[in-house]
Amino acid sequence: MRAQQAENAIDEIWSKALDKIMKADAPSQDRPELGSEIDLAVAQAGSSTLLSSVPTFTKMLYSGGYNAATRNTYLVLRRLGMPTDFFWKFGYWDEKRAFETLDKVISRVFTALMSKQKMGELQLVAVHPDTATFEIAFENCAECAGLTASAPMCFFHGGSFAGMLAAMLDEGLSATEVECVATGGERCRFMIRSSDDRASVVALDRWCAEFECHFEPERRFGVSLKNQMVRPTGNMVDIHYYQMLLAGAFLSNIDLIERACFEAGQAIGKSLLDTVRDMFGDDPSVALPSFYKSLRYANVVLAPSDDGGFEIKISEAPEHFGSLERSSLVPFLSGEIESLVSGLTGPL
């Protein structure tokens, strides 16, 4: 049931995102009060914290991106009126024709889609059809902007790029990130190779297994709350990018990581307590609404309850908005709010 729910949500989110670039007169899917964008620190927080605490989450991120892109690239090709076997002789094309044809399709749709959502700027760098090898560069990557890591960390985008090309060419592909902004690179760069190449599969497994992440919520959120830019294109991303991440990596695996999501939210709430108190005061009914609204995350309203606590109402949160309104993606936000309320109302 959860798997089908995730697939339905992914398809709806991709379709709405595609409408933004394919139909100029498409109706807006913006949230009435908070709008269509969210601070990318919100998306990074959940992923980075789980990368630190759940060793298999690297593969969940990668697979979430891969599966979503594979499923929906077929949708994109149909919307373009392209036959699904358009690239069936791709392996016999010369490099010039292969590059120009792929680049045209990628630029028309996928680069436009990612730029529109402020995920980053996708560029096809090299194509070798005889060996099914590709190089992709990604500027202003939303997955790692403003973060530091000991190794490349853009698993969701790596999976997305491999899945996109795999669906177009009807061939199993795997990706590894060979340059990352989080490790000091000028851009994020990915090598994508045939899954029949044992070395590419080993490289993917090593990338996912050896990665370690040390996320500092107070530093990263502090940057966004002070309006310090983490990339030239700004700190905001389209809400559909975050929802793709939620549906593909989180909802698809929620049975495995539900408890970890709640604990990750608690940990972030504790880390952010001093930051929230310093910037917004120690009255939860004022501090929490101000904090979440400044990130364009959610509308949060707190009212005193009869038992001396607070009744909390949340609206327009990405976890329960639009295509995800029927999902169960609340444990992360619940844990975070629990820690913040407890800390703000407890002893100093």
Image (spheres, helix red, strand yellow):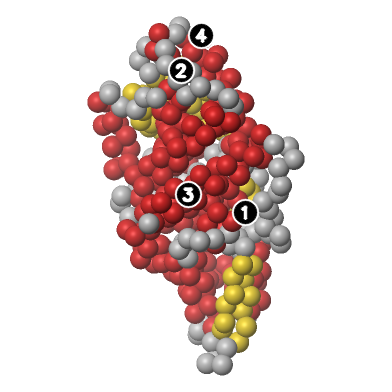
Quadrant location of the N terminus?
A: bottom left
Q: Amino acid at mark 4?
A: Lys
Q: CA distance from mark 3 to mark 4?
A: 38 Å
Q: Quadrant of residue 139?
A: top right
Say if residue 125 shows up in the picture: no
Kindly state the secondary structure of the residue where label 2 is placed: loop
Q: Amino acid at mark 3?
A: Asn
Examine the rendered structure and indicate whether residue 206 appears above or below residue 342: above
Q: Are marks 2 and 4 in contact (CB under 8 Å)?
A: no
Q: Dot 2 corresponds to which residue?
A: 87
Examine the rendered structure and indicate whether residue 93 appears above or below residue 301: above
Q: Dot 4 corresponds to which residue?
A: 96
Q: Quadrant of residue 309?
A: bottom right
Q: Amino acid at mark 1?
A: Ile
Which label sits in the foreground, 3 or 4?
3
> At which x and y percent is residue 187?
52, 32
